[in-house]
Amino acid sequence: MDSIRILGEEAVHPGQINIDDNKESAVAMFKMMNIIVEKMILEPKKIDELYQLMPKDKIEGIKNRDKKNEDTK
């Protein structure tokens, strides 16, 4: 995320043209954004969809177990 922030900030300052901008930097930023979206949004959603396939009583049992573990910390 730091690379996106730094490269992005360098690219968007008004009134400044950076002749060092290149296609490789832009492609790298898009690749990094795709990785971030995959890890932070898509993977958790896919995992939750699989989790929700379990029987509801099993999900409740897991929630109760986790609540008990939280209470003992």
Image: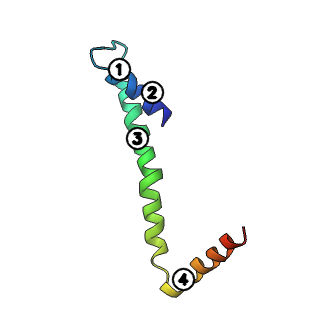
Residue of label 3: 33
State which mark lies toward you, 4 or 3: 4
Q: Amino acid at mark 3?
A: Met
Q: Real-space Cα distance between discs 4 and 3?
A: 35 Å
* Residue occupying the far right of the picture: 72
Which amino acid does the dot numbered 4 rest on? Glu
Secondary structure under badge 3? Answer: helix
Q: Earlier in the sequence, mark 4 or mark 2?
A: 2
**Residue 8, above or below 49:** above
Q: Residue at x 39, y 21 (%)?
A: 10
Label 2 – label 1 distance at C-alpha? 15 Å
**Sequence-earlier tag: 1 or 4:** 1
Q: Nearer the viewer, residue 2 or 73?
A: 73
- Which residue is tagged 1? 22
Which residue is label 4 attached to? 60
Residue density around tag 4, few if under 14, some if 14–19, many if 20 or more, within 10 Å: few
Q: Are marks 4 and 2 in contact (CB under 8 Å)?
A: no
From this view, report whether residue 68 is shown above or below residue 21. Answer: below
SS at badge 1: loop
Question: Callout 4: helix, strand or loop?
Answer: helix
- The residue labelled by disc 2 is 6
| Quadrant placement of the C terminus | bottom right
Q: Count up the numbered dots.
A: 4
Say which residue appears at 64% left-offset and 78% top-offset: 65
Q: CA distance from mark 1 to mark 3?
A: 17 Å
Cα gap from disc 1 to disc 4, whole angstroms = 52 Å
> Which one is nearer the viewer's eye here, 4 or 35?
4
Kindly identify the amino acid type of the residue bearing the numbered disc 1: Asn
Which mark sits nearer the N-terminus, 2 or 3?
Answer: 2
Return the residue found at the far left. 15
